[in-house]
Image: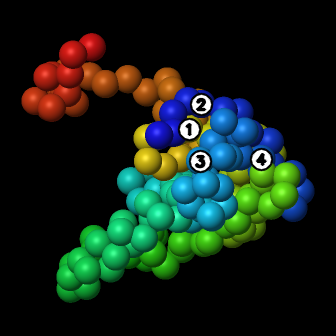
């Protein structure tokens, strides 16, 4: 399980170090392989899945009926953009330039553990997310039942 927030620096070649606490799990359970793809719900973020977690998600998304525009967009953003990433000997992955440009990630980003995957946010988009608050109108029954 991945959780926590880590400030990440991305070098000129697009390489970023995966935090050490997660490397062993990724190596042992997922053969050092991750998959990066766009977050279809929020701009400014990538979803980074361990390879073994990604495959069922990919297969489920690919089974969605292609007659609906929302399904095609989901397939485009998740499956079409999915990029296999492998940790190198120094525990780094290289993010494609196209993804870094689309998210406007220069050098600083934030990697957030979300349980079964990571979210990689541009520093600016992450700050906006942290500052966002829920209003009473946003509270669904599921949220009201949380034991906070």
Label annotation for residue 104? none
Q: Earlier in the sequence, mark 2 or mark 4?
A: 2
Q: CA distance from mark 2 to mark 3?
A: 17 Å
Q: CA distance from mark 1 to mark 4?
A: 13 Å
Q: CA distance from mark 2 to mark 4?
A: 14 Å
Residue appearing at x 80%, y 61% in the figure = 88
Nearer to us in this view, 18 or 127: 18
Callout 2 crowding tier (Cα within 10 Å): few <14, some 14–19, many ≥20: some
Label 1 belongs to which residue? 112
**Under tag 1, what secondary structure?**
strand
Q: Determine whether 67 is above or below 60 in the image.
A: below
Q: Pointers 1 and 2 in contact (CB under 8 A)?
A: yes
Q: CA distance from mark 1 to mark 3?
A: 16 Å
Label 2 belongs to which residue? 5
Residue appearing at x 36%, y 69% in the figure = 56
Left/right placement of residue 40 relative to residue 60 reads: right
User: Image quarter for residue 36?
Assistant: bottom right
Residue appearing at x 27%, y 14% in the figure = 148
Q: Determine whether 24 is above or below 99 in the image.
A: above
Callout 4 crowding tier (Cα within 10 Å): few <14, some 14–19, many ≥20: some
Left/right placement of residue 48 relative to residue 60 reads: right
Q: Earlier in the sequence, mark 4 or mark 3?
A: 4
Label 3 belongs to which residue? 25
**Under tag 2, what secondary structure?**
strand
Label 4 belongs to which residue? 17
Q: Earlier in the sequence, mark 1 or mark 2?
A: 2
Q: CA distance from mark 4 to mark 3?
A: 15 Å
């Amino acid at each position: 399980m991945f959780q926590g927030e880590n400030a990440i620096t991305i070098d000129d070649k697009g390489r970023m170090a995966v935090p050490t606490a997660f490397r062993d799990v990724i190596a042992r359970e997922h053969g050092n392989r991750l998959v990066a793809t766009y977050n279809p719900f929020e701009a400014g973020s990538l979803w980074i899945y361990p390879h073994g977690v990604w495959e069922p998600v990919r297969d489920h998304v690919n089974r969605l009926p292609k007659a609906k525009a929302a399904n095609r967009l989901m397939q485009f953003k998740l499956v079409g953009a999915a990029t296999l990433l492998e940790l190198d000997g120094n525990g780094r992955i290289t993010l494609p330039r196209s993804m870094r440009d689309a998210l406007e990630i220069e050098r600083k980003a934030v990697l957030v553990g979300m349980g079964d995957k990571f979210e990689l946010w541009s520093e600016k988009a992450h700050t906006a997310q942290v500052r966002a608050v829920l209003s009473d109108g946003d509270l669904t029954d599921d949220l009201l039942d949380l034991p906070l």
